[in-house]
Image (spheres, rainbow, N blue to C red):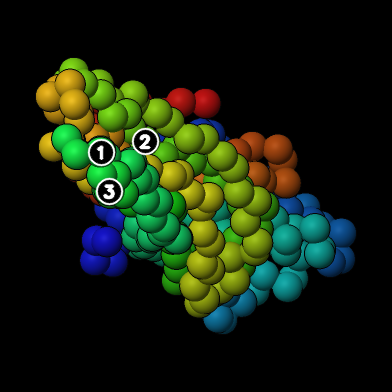
Amino acid sequence: MTSRQIVMLCLCTITMGISTAIAEMHAFTLEDGRALEAEIIDYNAKLGKVTLKRMDGKRIPVPSNIFIEADQEYIHEWDAAKAFSSDRFLKIFCDDEKIKERKEEKYKDISDTEGNVEKTLMKITAFEHIGYEITLQNMNQTAINGVRMEYNIYYEQSKESYEKPVADQKTFTDKITLPSLMGKKKTLVMTKGVEIHNDNINSINWVSGRARVGGKGEVHGMRARIYMKTSSGREIMREFCHPVSLSLGKFPWKD
């Protein structure tokens, strides 16, 4: 098991429509019905103040509650999208976990030259079920809603053989619908696991004299994408991997 570490993005942070999801002109409506077209520059959730940039370029800080409810929701979503796209405000931790393990033993009756039969242990197979524990830490005040995750777990497995074993490269793909990432909170999720096994073989007593080689399994790592869907239908995406050295060339994203 590796020690817990913050997952630095193995690629640059990848975003889909992030510029339009966070920075765009919006038609705000005040409670008295007046309209204002402006772009959000900053939002302080603690103070409840939003800084807007008007069409003429002038920046104005105003209380967010002077706008109608729909625009206040828009401001909150802008703040959540900004946090989601930044590894400063949405920190991602990842660790591989041994979910469960078991062993199987295989015996064979071996006869000596005098006809005596001895039950001999021929193989011990150790099975491990490996998954990933992911922590999403929202450092922002505003909750992040509408988040989902897709992930790939890359692993290999060979079978016992009289020849040189050939490892079968495998990819397990699944999805997770995430709960709201509450402000100033950590959200813990667990992926499903993949099973690998390693054989410890006793080949001395085979009459043929041919030595068997046991099967071996290894989990290489995981790659994940998290998406946030905005009210306008746009999706912002971030990608991360564990370990951070996981090769994109050898282990590319698979839908």
Residue 198 on image: x %, y %: 28, 44
Mark 2 — residue? Answer: 154
Amino acid type, mark 3: Glu
Helix or strand or loop: what does disc 1 sit on?
A: loop
- Give coordinates of residue 130: x percent, y percent: 40, 52
Look at the picture and state if 207 lies above or below 45.
Answer: above
Name of the residue lying farthest toward the bottom: 47
Q: Residue visible at 74% across and 71% down?
A: 66
Tag 1–tag 3 contact (CB < 8 Å) = no
Which mark is on residue 118? 3
Is label 3 in contact with label 2 (beta carbons under 8 Å)? no
User: Mark 1: which amino acid?
Assistant: Gly
> In this rendering, would 179 be left or right of 79?
right
Q: Is residue 77 above or below residue 208?
A: below
Residue at point 48%, 49% (across, down): 193
Between 59 and 252, the residue placed more toward the observer is 252
Residue at 62% in and 56% down? 178
State whether residue 177 is above or below residue 182. Answer: above
Image coordinates of residue 92 in percent, x first then y, are 39, 59
Please, what is the three-letter code of the amino acid marked with disc 2? Answer: Tyr
- The x, y position of residue 24, in whole percent, is 57, 42
| Secondary structure of the residue carrying numbered label 3 | strand
Disc 1 vs disc 2: which is toward the camera?
A: 1
The N terminus is located in which quarter?
A: bottom left
Residue at point 33% right, 41% down? 108
Q: Nearer the viewer, mark 1 or mark 3?
A: 1
Which residue position is annotated with label 1? 115
Q: Which numbered tag is attached to residue 81?
A: none
Q: Quadrant of residue 216?
A: top left
